[in-house]
Each structure stands twice: as C-alpha cells, then as structure tokens.
C-alpha cells in the first residue's frame, strides 16, 4: 500500500478550523424537533419554539423551552385549569437546570440535572452528542431519554 504524500504544515494551517465550543453565555433556541421511532418528524414545541439557555463561567446552566401557541386558561386561574389546559402546559414546555460540560472529545455534552420540569431527569446525567458549526450548537436527546424511541434535537445560537 503506497504511503500518502505529506501535507505541508502551511496547507494545514490554511484549513479553516471551527473554534472550540465555549458554553458560557446566553443561547437562543432556533429549532427543536423530534424524529419519531418510525422515522417521521414532529415538533413538540411548534415550528418556532421559544427557548433560552444560559451557562455561567462555572458551568451552571438553566434551560427553558416553550411552545409559543400554548392556550391561555379560560378561567384565568392557574389552579382551575381543565385537563386539556394542564396537558398543553406540561407538553408545551421543558425546563431544567444544573451543571453542563463539554467533554474534550469535541462531540459530547454532559448535563448533570439538578431540577427539571420532567422529574425523571432530576439527579441524573444526560449525555448529548453535539456539533458546533458557525456559532450554532446542535445536540440530540437520545431515544433512551424519551422512553418511546423518539430522538429530540435542540438547535441553539449564541447571543453573546
């Protein structure tokens, strides 16, 4: 088998490199969608979800994701919603906080969840495979986290 030619260092330096992922800062959600077990695409938070992720210098994070078209409670009273109204609130939002870190492999995030609107995540680590390109962070929530074979994708753009 022939030995491949050496690539001059000057040429390697000219290849554009993606900057390393720096999580610290504020991130705006640009997209959230799911690929269901049957391969179809869905959007639990609508086509234009509203979301904010904030990460401090110590890796403490908070995430809030909301479906923008959640219905108002007809009663105007949070304690007197209908089952349908409560369902829309629960399924139309996701929040959690804790600590997050990017592993040195350049493709894995680890969320150590302290509290979450989905209590089954509390006190657990959530591992996410990610990509970071052109200032956009995309990560997958594996099917094992959903329990039903759905893989959810979150797409974030850094604000500052």
Image: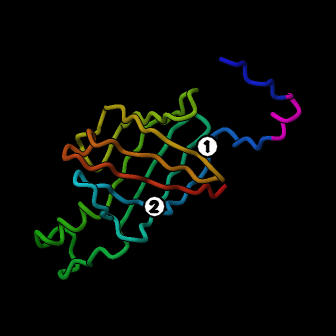
Left/right placement of residue 89 relative to residue 59 reads left
Q: Position of residue 157 (x, y in %)?
A: 58, 57
- Numbered disc 2: secondary structure: strand
Specify the quadrant of the image occupied by residue 6. top right
User: Residue 70, relative to residue 38: is it above or below?
Assistant: below
Q: Identify the residue shown where x is 54% and y is 28%.
A: 103
Instruction: Tell me which numbered mark, 1 or 2, is placed earlier along the sequence.
Output: 1
Q: Identify the residue shown where x is 29% and y is 37%.
A: 122
- Numbered disc 1: secondary structure: loop
Of residues 16 and 157, which is closer to you in this image? Answer: 16
Specify the quadrant of the image occupied by residue 34. bottom left
User: Residue 5, relative to residue 32: is it above or below?
Assistant: above
Extent of the magenta region: 8-14
Mark 1 vs 2: CB contact within 8 A: no
Specify the quadrant of the image occupied by residue 43. bottom left
Which residue is denoted by mark 1 in the rendering? 24
Magenta stretch encompasses residue 96: no
Q: Identify the residue shown where x is 22% and y is 70%.
A: 78
The secondary structure that dominates the magenta segment is helix
User: Residue 76, relative to residue 119: is it above or below?
Assistant: below
Quadrant including the C terminus = bottom right
Which residue is denoted by mark 2 in the rendering? 51
**CA separation in Å, label 1 and label 2:** 16 Å
Q: Position of residue 68 (x, y in %)?
A: 37, 73
Q: Position of residue 125 (x, y in %)?
A: 36, 31
Quadrant including the N terminus = top right
User: Of all residues shown, which one is farthest toward the left?
Assistant: 83
Q: How many labels were placed on the picture? A: 2
Neighbour class for label 2 at 10 Å: few (<14), some, many (≥20)?
A: many
């Amino acid at each position: 088998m022939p030995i491949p030619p050496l690539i001059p260092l000057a040429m390697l330096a000219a290849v554009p490199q993606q900057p390393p992922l720096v999580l610290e800062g504020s991130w705006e959600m640009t997209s959230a969608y799911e690929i269901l077990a049957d391969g179809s695409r869905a959007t639990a938070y609508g086509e234009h979800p509203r979301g904010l992720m904030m990460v401090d210098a110590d890796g403490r994070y908070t995430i809030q994701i909301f479906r923008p078209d959640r219905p108002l409670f007809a009663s105007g009273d949070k304690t007197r919603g209908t089952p349908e109204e409560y369902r829309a609130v629960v399924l139309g939002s996701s929040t959690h906080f804790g600590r997050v870190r990017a592993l040195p492999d350049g493709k894995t995030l680890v969320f150590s969840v302290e509290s979450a609107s989905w209590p089954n995540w509390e006190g657990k680590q959530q591992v996410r495979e990610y990509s970071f390109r052109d200032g956009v962070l995309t990560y997958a929530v594996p099917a094992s986290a959903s329990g039903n074979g759905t893989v959810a994708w979150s797409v974030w753009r850094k604000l500052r």
